[in-house]
Image (tube, rainbow, N blue to C red):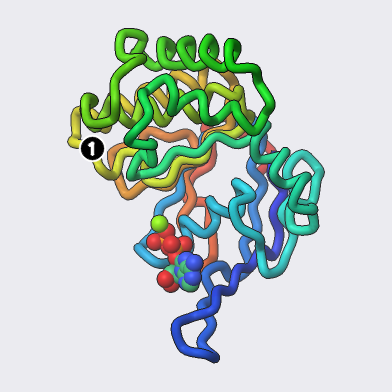
Amino acid sequence: MYEISGLTKIYQGKGKNEKVHALQGVDVVIPDNDMLAIQGPTGHGKSTLLQLLGGLDRPTGGSLKFDGQEMAKMGEMSLTKLRAQNFGYIFQGFNLIPTLTAQENVETALVPLGVSKVERRERAAKALTDVGLGERLGHLQTELSGGQQQRVAIARALVKEPKVILADEPTGNLDEETRDDIFGLLEKLWADLGLTVIMVTHDSALSKRVPRLAQIKNGKLTIKRERAGATGV
Ligand SMILES: Nc1ncnc2c1ncn2[C@@H]1O[C@H](COP(=O)(O)OP(=O)(O)O)[C@@H](O)[C@H]1O
Ligand SMILES: [Mg+2]
């Protein structure tokens, strides 16, 4: 679970004294097994929030707690460990390593966890089978369609058995039919594995389907729709 209050992020702008206020006081609680979609105009702080949630960058101010641990104040080693154990990332551009096979790409996620080579191979093969790519273990990126590449990226996020999947426009580079497939896969994983899924999306058809919807505008987040049946929020 995330407990976030007054979260801010200020970047150094291009000019010497220029500051970019990317997040301007975000308050939100994201319970375990939530599926939250975040919408909003370009440049308004969506990717910034996802990066902070994933411990890929540090907030400027405010509180960002994951399972009671203050990520803003955590040392680099603890943060690296937290990332490796808990967060799986999916990006619009897939971010696969082109010289590695599907299976090797997935294995890379287990290296920071100190998993043995043999176990890495086994777990990567299983994760790829789980996303429907059991027949494509030895394929390179250039031998896979866009949807298949994103499936490899999803397997790479899943293989470490994270608590949270953070997806930044995961369907942004895909055609409509493939978008539906990938979104359906994320829904299935969310339901079957009890993951927390936090996803930035421009796709209004997809955001209609998610249980909980938020919007970021000018670095501020508002909840647009609560999960059906949720109480006390
Ligand atoms: N590393 C960075 N350095 C400086 N400015 C940045 C950096 N990353 C993002 N920004 C700026 O912060 C603002 C929010 O960006 P971002 O979170 O990527 O928005 P979104 O994902 O909603 O399009 C934008 O003005 C963007 O230019
Ligand atoms: Mg973005």
Residue 206, can we see it?
Answer: yes
For ligand 1, the image quadrant comes to: bottom left
Would residue 79 appear left or right of 173 to someone viewing this image?
A: right
The mark tally for this picture is 1
- Viewer-nearest residue: 67 or 148: 148
- Viewer-nearest residue: 47 or 202: 47
Would residue 56 appear left or right of 176 to someone viewing this image?
A: right
Residue plotted at (44% across, 19% down): 188
Give coordinates of residue 124: x percent, y percent: 49, 17
Residue 217, can we see it?
Answer: no
Residue plotted at (63% across, 29% down): 163
Residue plotted at (33% across, 27% down): 182
In this picture, is 86 found above or below 117? Answer: below
Give coordinates of residue 217: x percent, y percent: 45, 65
Outermost residue to the bottom: 17
Mark 1: give few (<14), some (14-19) or many (20+) Cα within 10 Å.
some
Going by the numbered disc 1, the residue's amino acid type is Leu
Give coordinates of residue 148: x percent, y percent: 28, 25
Indicate the quadrant containing the C terminus: top left, top right, bottom left or bottom right: top right
Q: Quadrant of residue 172?
A: top left
- Viewer-nearest residue: 213 or 98: 98
Indicate the quadrant containing the N terminus: top left, top right, bottom left or bottom right: top right
Would residue 44 appear left or right of 8 to someone viewing this image?
A: left
Residue plotted at (79% across, 53% down): 75
Label 1: state its secondary structure: loop
Q: Which residue is mark 1?
A: 174
Establish whether ligand 2 lies closer than 8 Å to the Cβ of label 1: no
